[in-house]
Image: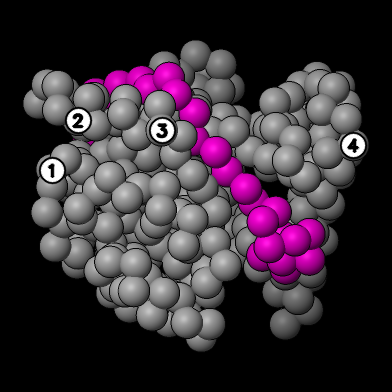
């Protein structure tokens, strides 16, 4: 069997469906960042174990969950409140965990992002995420838009994980990414976001997570990033083929990139004026 980890912060609306989607597990943990909307009570009423911790950074919060929670099983499925594993994925994960060799420490799956009930098949920048990990063999790095490092081989799952990032509306998405952009701008101004910039890694790294980190670091060095991102998503990846939802998503992502750059400049100017 598999334990389930759901990190929450005011997820009263999405949490019931998230827990229902993993009702096959007898060990569901909700690791909460001191919600104020009744998330904890909802989780307990639905049979989940609830642990609270004050939020500091995204990677620290996730790593704390790995370290603190008394998981019953060897394998942990990491789920966000706005995500739903399909029944096919649930069956595939259970079979994979039962048959994995000791060398395998995690499994990578494909996530499908949705906007207005439209699958962002072309607009989604990357569908690949490691979400099923062996206990004690994984840790998160990077304070925001964190990456998961796994000690061991990575297997592959085929069935999709559904993701509804706009389940709380456009305003909530914008507010959340306003916070993300501040954190990203701080990292960028410090130089930490570009430390792993490597053309070789971006092109030839076999590990998907390492390749993504190198590509992101190079991207942060480019001029006109917001415009480049919009053109890349719209025409190279084909967001326009996803219709209005794809165009909207590409524009929102480019706006997010613009916020990061504006805030980075503001931080740099503030430091120079001191």
Q: Quadrant of the C terminus?
A: bottom right
Q: What separation in Å lies between label 2 and label 4 (alpha carbons)?
A: 39 Å
Residue 175 part of the magenta-drawn span: yes
Report if the CB atoms under discs 3 and 4 are less than 8 Å apart: no
Sequence-first tag of 2 and 4:
2
Q: Residue 131's spot in the image, x, y percent?
A: 37, 39
Q: Residue at x 51, y 48 (%)?
A: 83
Sequence-first tag of 3 and 1:
1
* Dot in front, 3 or 1: 3
Give the magenta-colored segment's residue range. Answer: 150-177
| Secondary-structure class at tag 1 | loop
Q: Residue 87's spot in the image, x, y percent?
A: 41, 33
Badge 2 crowding class, 10 Å Cα cut-off, few under 14, some 14 to 19, many 20 or more, is many
Q: What separation in Å lies between label 2 and label 1 (alpha carbons)?
A: 8 Å
Residue 266 lies, with reference to residue 218, above or below; the image says: below
Disc number placed over residue 244 in the picture, else none: 4
Sequence-first tag of 4 and 1:
1
Left or right: where 222 falls relative to 162: right
| Secondary-structure class at tag 4 | helix
The residue that label 1 is drawn on is 74
Q: Residue 50's spot in the image, x, y percent?
A: 29, 73
Q: What separation in Å lies between label 3 and label 1 (alpha carbons)?
A: 21 Å
| Secondary-structure class at tag 2 | helix
Disc number placed over residue 87 in the picture, else none: 3
Q: What separation in Å lies between label 3 and label 2 (alpha carbons)?
A: 16 Å
């Amino acid at each position: 069997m598999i334990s389930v980890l759901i990190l929450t912060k005011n997820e009263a609306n999405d949490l019931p469906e998230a827990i229902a989607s993993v009702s096959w597990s007898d060990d569901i943990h909700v690791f909460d960042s001191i919600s104020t909307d009744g998330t904890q009570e909802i989780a307990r009423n639905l049979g989940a174990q609830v642990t609270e911790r004050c939020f500091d950074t995204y990677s620290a919060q996730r790593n704390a969950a790995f370290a603190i929670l008394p998981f019953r099983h060897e394998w942990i499925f990491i789920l966000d409140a706005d995500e739903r594993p399909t029944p096919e994925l649930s069956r595939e994960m259970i079979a994979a965990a039962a048959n994995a060799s000791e060398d395998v420490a995690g499994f990578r799956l494909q996530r499908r992002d949705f906007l207005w009930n439209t699958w962002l098949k072309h607009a989604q920048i990357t569908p690949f995420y490691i979400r099923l990990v062996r206990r004690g063999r994984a840790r998160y790095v990077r304070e925001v838009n964190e990456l998961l490092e796994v000690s061991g081989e990575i297997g592959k799952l085929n069935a999709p994980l559904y993701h509804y990032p706009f389940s709380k509306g456009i305003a909530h998405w914008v507010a959340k990414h306003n916070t993300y952009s501040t954190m990203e701008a701080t990292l960028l101004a410090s130089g930490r976001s570009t430390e792993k910039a490597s053309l070789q890694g971006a092109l030839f790294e076999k590990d998907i997570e390492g390749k993504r980190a190198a590509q992101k670091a190079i991207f942060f060095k480019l001029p006109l990033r917001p415009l480049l991102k919009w053109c890349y998503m719209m025409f190279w990846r084909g967001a326009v083929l996803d219709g209005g939802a794809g165009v909207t998503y590409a524009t929102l992502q480019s706006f997010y990139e613009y916020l990061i750059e504006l805030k980075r400049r503001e931080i740099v100017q503030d430091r120079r004026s001191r």
